[in-house]
Image: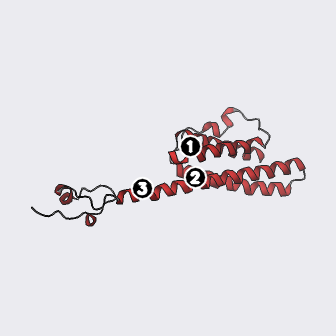
Amino acid sequence: MLTEVWQAQALAQAIGSRLAVAGPPELRGEALGLTELAGRGCGVLDTPRLATEDLRAAQLTELGDARQALVCLGGLLGEVGMALVGLACASDDESTYWQCMESIDAADESRDRVQQMLRRLADREEELPREGTRLQGVALPETARKEEVLPEGVLPEAVPEREAG
């Protein structure tokens, strides 16, 4: 079980690292923080003896959609936290109990960082339509009006009619 927790934290570290280097600019600082938090999550656990091909984080080749990757990672970290609570409650070994407690804290902090990143992405998505509405009221060539070839986000009724003349 703790090997799977370590794998999840290593995956969070890899995703954070990828987003810090090549993700949306507004996520890069938070992504670096995720990398550090997830690294701490790996550090509180005994490093499992896994072959390189068994390291899931090493198999990560690309993220694709940052939002979707973060949603899935947030869900995984939440599940990890719940599983660790169950393991800690059932543990008779004090060392395992405290490893679980530290790992719960690290998974929770990593998940919080993922949630912050998702909020930043949502804020960016809200800003994009507003940028399109700035074009309202701009006089467009008559051909654009007749053919209804308007910039994205501009509705035909928002474009003022040109006076003949």
Q: CA distance from mark 3 to mark 2?
A: 17 Å
Q: Which numbered disc flags the more N-terminal residue, 1 or 2? A: 1
Q: Which mark is residue 128?
A: 3
Q: Give the residue furthest to the left.
A: 165
Q: Residues within 10 Å of mark 2 (few under 14, many from 20)?
A: many
Q: Which mark is residue 19?
A: 1
Q: Give the residue furthest to the top.
A: 52
Q: CA distance from mark 1 to mark 2?
A: 10 Å
- The amino acid pointed to by label 1 is Leu
Q: Is residue 120 above or below residue 18?
A: below
Residue in the image at 53% along x and 52% along y = 67
| Residue 77 percent across, percent down from the top left | 67, 52
Q: Nearer the viewer, mark 1 or mark 3?
A: 3
Nearer to the camera, 118 or 55: 118
Q: Secondary structure at mark 2?
A: helix
Q: Are marks 1 and 2 in contact (CB under 8 Å)?
A: yes
Nearer to the camera, 11 or 141: 141
Nearer to the camera, 50 or 146: 146
Q: Secondary structure at mark 3?
A: helix
Q: Residues within 10 Å of mark 1 (few under 14, many from 20)?
A: many
Please give the count of numbered marks on the rendered protein: 3
Quarter of the rendering containing residue 79: bottom right
Q: Is residue 11 above or below residue 122?
A: above
Q: Which numbered disc flags the more N-terminal residue, 1 or 3? A: 1
Q: Are marks 1 and 3 in contact (CB under 8 Å)?
A: no
Residue hosting label 2: 117
Q: Secondary structure at mark 1?
A: helix
Question: 90 left or right of 84?
Answer: right
